[in-house]
Image (tube, coloured by chain):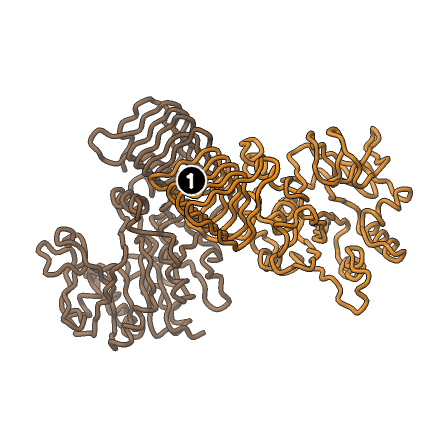
């Protein structure tokens, strides 16, 4: 079955910087934004961009992620031709290997990609929050007669040293690429979104596989090599909201970005983000509740007060409990009189009566999944 | 329960609830913030293990088909069995259009069905019931027909069917539209019987000029069959009047009833829409209300139900009201005891008030 453009989502990362939040699940399965998981964003973007063949490369703690993806129905990706494919590493005749890097993960699935005989392959990561129409990027890729296109976003000079930084000529052709430079030459950061001509990429993947010095990584190996070989590499500039939620701080910030009078990232636009979830009724707001600047999802019961917070489905907030600047994930229960400040409470937690969750130094407190907090004044309980 | 066939009859009397059924049958009246009334019977059937459900379509079928589609959201899109539709016949002889006629014309489907029992119900009942208990009752009592009934415990303001039962549950009297007291046993319009009995009743009564399954079928054949009444003591409300709709909606603000219907038992399914979580802005002030996904709230909401995608602007005050999907309430408007049907726009500074016992209805797509 011929497909013009096929997407591969790299969803195998452990996400160790998310600490206890990825104790049991892979990073792309981490909850976000009141009812979503991180992987909903690339999947919905694919679906809305008309890309209906999507491989999801999984490796680290994949059970919950696999269960969540199911047939891909939630993202309208349960297609007769194409649809979602879950691609964990597998054993071959002679050897069995884990995915050793982003490029190796794609290399090990060359067979899968070839069955769709694509002209272009879109490589995405499963840990970014953004909405983007990939079909425009593909158009530009074709117009530029590019062999590879990398999506870039302007970042501040200060942040630039955390990203892969591109330098381009005035046609958008990439002339230099530096991974996490100390003295950045430009402020165009790679968003980890690539479109490659498949024939070319296949050749580079095969060469890279044979190179025992390579780390088998797109940013560190494949892109620099292509640049050195004068491959037609172009940038595609994106100016919407984009956030790498690889750390506790950035995950918390991205959640907070959804709040405010005019949020910096508005989920409510016409570009719908799909997710798979339990059927739950509208949430119930009790007589003494007070909710401002917050997002609240289905099945929640709110009797306390909530300010600047994101409340996931099925959460209970007891009477006189106070939630400020926090993210409360599905089915957690905050009992009467408890106070939660600047915290991420993972799913199925229980904060008992009158407990106080906060931290002295202004950092973010994280309560791991399934924890019960009983002592009053728990300060900075296990940061990841 | 895979030997029970579910049949949902959508030919329902809407004379007392006309305002919100002009373009839809009772079955697709929006209810509880994100549901349609048919979701309750359909989910109960599915959660009880029924995998084959026939929907008897009424004239205004568009909203039903739009809501149910393949039945996927209820897990009824199946390779075999699953959801199917019984269409009203459109032959020349339309003098006798009736529910019995539709059954009669579709008897072949029922004859072919592999299920032993038929569970027949309307779609106007709000409950979350496990029919396994009803089947057990039916088998234990050796009944030919089991009628489900409940004790409303409050005065009903709309017509209902009242039954009397003997101590062992045998039905001794069925009365349609009597003056019912508070302690009356009221039929829920849900019947369990073997397929054989169902076919007999439909054939016998239709061939003798009948049109209504209860009046011309069951009630005329009480001597023929052992009819048992099975009492359901969970929350039940049969919606066939506007006041009943309003009252039942307000019942949901009682956490006990909300929990019983939606949380403590099996889930109620509905068509999924992928709305964003509800957004509360800095001036939001919400008390004792049910709020759905997709809402944006900047004003005051009290004792009310907001459906999906409702926008409440600054200075708006809403009390004791039901605001359906897609409504927009602009600055400083004020609503009390009002039901807004879908996509209503209330422009700035408007004041609307109904009576507590007679809510004001704003029809679909109205701009005030």
In this rendering, position of residue B159 left or right of residue A287? right
Instruction: Tell which of B96 and A59 is nearer to you.
Output: B96
Q: Can the viewer see residue B245?
A: yes
- Provide the residue designation for mark 1: A330
Instruction: Tell which of A230 and A161 is nearer to you.
Output: A161
In this rendering, position of residue B184 left or right of residue B361? right
Question: Which quadrant of the view contains residue B286?
Answer: top left
Instruction: Tell which of B270 and B226 is nearer to you.
Output: B270
Image chain in brown: A
The x and y percentages for residue A230 are: 16, 74
Question: Which quadrant of the view contains residue A194?
Answer: bottom left
The colour chain B appears in is: orange
Q: Total number of numbered labels?
A: 1
Mark 1 crowdedness (10 Å alpha carbons): few <14, some 14-19, many ≥20: many
- Tell me if residue B205 comes above or below residue B282 in the rendering: below
Locate the N terminus of chain A and report the quarter of the image it occupies: bottom left
The x and y percentages for residue A166 are: 16, 63
- SS under mark 1: loop
Q: Residue at x 24, y 76 (%)?
A: A144
Label 1: chain letter: A
Q: Can the viewer see residue A24?
A: no
The x and y percentages for residue B121 are: 72, 47
Q: Residue at x 36, y 65 (%)?
A: A7
Q: Residue at x 15, y 59 (%)?
A: A187
The x and y percentages for residue A185 are: 10, 60
Question: Which quadrant of the view contains residue A184?
Answer: bottom left
- Tell me if residue B292 comes above or below residue A59 in the rendering: above
Locate the C terminus of chain A and report the quarter of the image it occupies: top left
């Amino acid at each position: 079955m011929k497909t013009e453009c096929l997407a591969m989502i790299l969803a195998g990362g452990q996400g160790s910087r998310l600490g206890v939040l990825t104790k049991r699940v892979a990073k792309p399965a981490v909850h976000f934004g009141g009812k979503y998981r991180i992987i909903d964003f690339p999947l919905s973007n694919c679906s809305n961009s008309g890309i209906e063949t999507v491989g999801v490369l999984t490796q680290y703690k994949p059970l919950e992620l696999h269960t969540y993806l199911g047939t891909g129905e939630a993202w309208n990706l349960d297609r007769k031709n194409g649809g979602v494919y879950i691609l964990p590493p597998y054993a071959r005749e002679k050897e069995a290997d884990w995915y050793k890097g982003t490029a190796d993960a794609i290399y090990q699935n060359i067979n899968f990609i070839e069955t769709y005989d694509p002209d272009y392959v879109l490589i995405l990561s499963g840990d970014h929050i953004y909405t983007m129409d990939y079909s425009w990027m593909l158009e530009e890729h074709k117009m530029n007669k590019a062999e590879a296109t990398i999506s870039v976003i302007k970042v501040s000079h200060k942040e630039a040293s955390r990203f892969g930084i591109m330098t381009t000529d005035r046609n958008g052709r990439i002339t230099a690429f530096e991974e996490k430079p100390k003295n950045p030459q430009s402020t165009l950061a790679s968003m980890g979104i690539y479109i490659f001509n498949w024939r070319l990429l296949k050749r580079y993947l095969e060469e890279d596989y044979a190179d025992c010095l390579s780390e088998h990584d797109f940013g560190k190996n494949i892109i620099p090599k292509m640049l050195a070989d004068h491959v037609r590499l172009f940038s595609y500039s994106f100016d919407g909201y984009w956030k790498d939620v690889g750390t506790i701080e950035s995950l918390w910030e991205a959640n907070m970005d959804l709040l405010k009078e005019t949020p910096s990232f508005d989920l409510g636009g016409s570009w719908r983000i799909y997710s798979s979830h339990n059927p739950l009724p509208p949430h119930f707001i009790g007589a003494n509740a007070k909710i401002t600047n917050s997002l609240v999802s289905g099945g929640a019961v709110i009797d306390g007060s909530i300010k600047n917070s994101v409340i996931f489905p099925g959460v209970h907030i007891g009477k006189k409990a106070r939630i400020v600047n926090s993210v409360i994930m599905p089915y957690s229960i905050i009992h009467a009189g408890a106070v939660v400040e600047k915290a991420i409470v993972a799913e199925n937690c229980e904060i008992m009566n009158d407990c106080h969750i906060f931290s002295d130094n202004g950092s973010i407190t994280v309560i791991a999944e399934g924890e019960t907090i009983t002592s009053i004044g728990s300060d900075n309980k296990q940061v990841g | 329960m895979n030997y029970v066939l579910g049949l949902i009859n959508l030919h329902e009397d809407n004379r007392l609830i006309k305002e919100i059924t002009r373009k839809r049958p009772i079955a697709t009246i929006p209810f509880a913030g994100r549901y349609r009334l048919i979701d309750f019977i359909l989910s109960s059937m599915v959660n009880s293990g029924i995998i084959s459900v026939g929907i008897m379509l009424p004239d205004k079928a568009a909203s039903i088909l739009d809501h149910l589609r393949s039945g996927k959201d209820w897990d009824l899109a199946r390779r075999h069995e699953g959801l199917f539709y019984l269409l009203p016949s459109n032959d020349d002889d339309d003098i006798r259009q009736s529910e019995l006629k539709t059954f009669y014309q579709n008897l072949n489907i029922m004859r072919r069905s592999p299920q032993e029992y038929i569970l027949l119900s309307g779609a106007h009942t709000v409950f979350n019931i496990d029919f396994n208990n009803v089947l057990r009752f039916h088998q234990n009592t050796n009944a030919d027909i089991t009628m489900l009934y409940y004790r409303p415990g409050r005065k009903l303001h709309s017509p209902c069917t009242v039954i009397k039962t003997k101590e062992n549950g045998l039905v001794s009297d069925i009365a349609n539209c009597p003056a019912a007291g508070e302690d009356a046993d009221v039929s829920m319009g849900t019947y369990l019987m073997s397929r054989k009995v169902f076919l007999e009743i439909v054939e016998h009564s239709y061939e003798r000029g009948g049109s209504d399954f209860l009046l011309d079928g069951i009630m005329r054949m009480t001597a023929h069959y052992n009819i048992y009444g099975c009492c359901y003591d969970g929350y039940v409300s049969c919606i066939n009047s506007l006041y009943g709709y309003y009252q039942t909606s307000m019942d949901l603000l009682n956490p006990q009833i909300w929990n019983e219907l939606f949380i403590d038992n099996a889930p109620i399914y509905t068509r999924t829409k992928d709305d964003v979580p509800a957004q509360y802005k800095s001036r939001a002030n919400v008390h004792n209300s049910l709020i759905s996904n997709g809402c944006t709230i900047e004003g005051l909401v009290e004792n009310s139900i907001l459906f999906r995608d409702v926008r409440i602007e600054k200075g708006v005050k809403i009390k004791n009201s039901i605001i359906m999907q897609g409504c927009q309430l602009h600055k400083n408007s004020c609503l009390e005891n009002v039901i807004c049907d879908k996509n209503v726009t209330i422009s700035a500074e408007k004041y609307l008030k109904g009576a507590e016992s007679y809510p004001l209805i704003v029809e679909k797509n109205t701009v005030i």
